[in-house]
Image (tube, grey):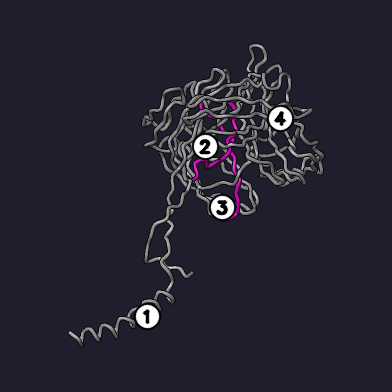
Amino acid sequence: MRIKSFLLAVRAPFIIGVALTIATLLPHAGTLISQGGSYPAVVCPGALGGATEQISLPSGGISTRAVAARNLKLTLAKSRVIAGGVAPTFVSGNPGSEVAFESLLGTSTADAVCEVGDNDQWFIGGSAGVTSQGTLQIINSGLSDSMVQIFPYNSKVALAPIALTVMANSAKNIALASIAPGDEALALHLVTDSGRVSSFLLDHRRSGLKDLGASFVTPVAAPATTSYISGILASGAKVASSMRFLVPGNINASVHLTIFSAGGVLTPVGFDALTIAHQRVIDLPLPQIALSGAYGIEITSDQPLFAATLTRTSGAGTDFAWAGQLTPLSSFRVNFAGARAQFFFMGSSISLQAQWVDNKGKPNSTRISGSSYASWRPVGALNGVSFKLLSKRPIYGGAIVANVNGGLSYLPLLANQLISRSQAPVADLRTLARQ
């Protein structure tokens, strides 16, 4: 026993010393950061202005509910195309994008990508003139009241802000004519002070009993010195386009426009070093240019600004459509619900894969590429379409859509349900890091 005690007394300091040496020399146990992710829910607008509405879902197994007081029950959609109602529609998170197709009187159609929502949104488009039947819909899909401020701009000045409260799980519709009565040129800046808010602006115009057309105005998050508008219908005898600008800062902007099309690259007359006054909505007609197919516009300026394109069609199919500034494209899936579409992409290096299903259920695939622009016009009606980016450089894409009810609509290619990631620490002694 004495020998064992002696050996233990001798070994103990040695063991402790070795342990201390190992603890000092080896890295300490770190923390493994587990990356968890989920897709956010989106909100689709309600049927506005007496429209009928269909909402396309990118896949099956998606739950929805109406954004209306006391209604929080999610229902599994039985089809990939569901009917929308007067109340907005809440769509559960998924890796695709939903689209609301609205048809009004005559051939007027308006399509909108359903929105996650943002606390800062700009709408560059719309009218509050004598023909205006337009509506701003502010949707609070959260469970508490939301405070929202509207900062309007017209062709002369920035107008006084409007503050309002939107009740929980409800929507508020505001006539554009009540925001800036009589103003043909309009832009709105919406700031959400609290709550989960999504907003949609429907520009709808009528003259007496004649319907002049309708279009949703896509919201933009911030002004830019370089921006892209893609997928615009070429001008013709019954097609004319114009530009709308807003410089939100305190300095006038010098603006340059470049048009990209299958016929080449050009700058319209009068749009080289064009001066745009600040804090005023400026409308300028684009000259009639013989272009083949869809085209896109690159806008560069020395001051951050907003820009949008308005295209009007006349004759038997009277309608109009707004195209706004685009954000870079991401890989995503969208359902065109039997609509016909032509696509136009812009960027310094375009390379992407498109896979789609036609109206007969036949799968198809193609690669789209180009040095600065590329166009794609699939034959026939479209249903589900998936875009996979093959280039690491930003690509901007838009579509000219003619849905089953006719009319003209511009649709930005937006992956609005990008995954929202959160980090959760997980203790793992196998993950070691020196201090």
Amino acid type at mark 1: Gly
Which one is earlier in the sequence, the residue at label 4 or at label 3?
4
**Does residue 433 appear left or right of residue 153 in this picture?**
left
Mark 3 closeness class: few <14, some 14–19, many ≥20 residues within 10 Å: many
Mark 1 closeness class: few <14, some 14–19, many ≥20 residues within 10 Å: few
- Residue bearing mark 1: 17
Give whichever of 75, 57 is nearer the camera: 75
Task: Classify mark 4: helix, strand or loop.
Answer: strand
Q: CA distance from mark 2 to mark 1?
A: 59 Å
For discs 4 and 2, the disc positioned in front in the rendered view: 2
Q: CA distance from mark 4 to mark 1?
A: 85 Å
Q: Residue furthest bottom?
A: 3
Task: Classify mark 1: helix, strand or loop.
Answer: helix
**Does residue 19 appear left or right of residue 289 in this picture?**
left
Give whichever of 254, 435 is nearer the camera: 435
Q: CA distance from mark 1 to mark 3?
A: 61 Å
- Residue bearing mark 2: 116
Q: Which residues are magenta?
A: 392-419
Which one is earlier in the sequence, the residue at label 4 or at label 2?
2
Which one is earlier in the sequence, the residue at label 2 or at label 1?
1
Amino acid type at mark 3: Ser
- Residue bearing mark 4: 240
Amino acid type at mark 2: Val
- Residue bearing mark 3: 351
For discs 3 and 2, the disc positioned in front in the rendered view: 2
Amino acid type at mark 4: Ala
Looking at the image, residue 47 lies above or below residue 13 = above
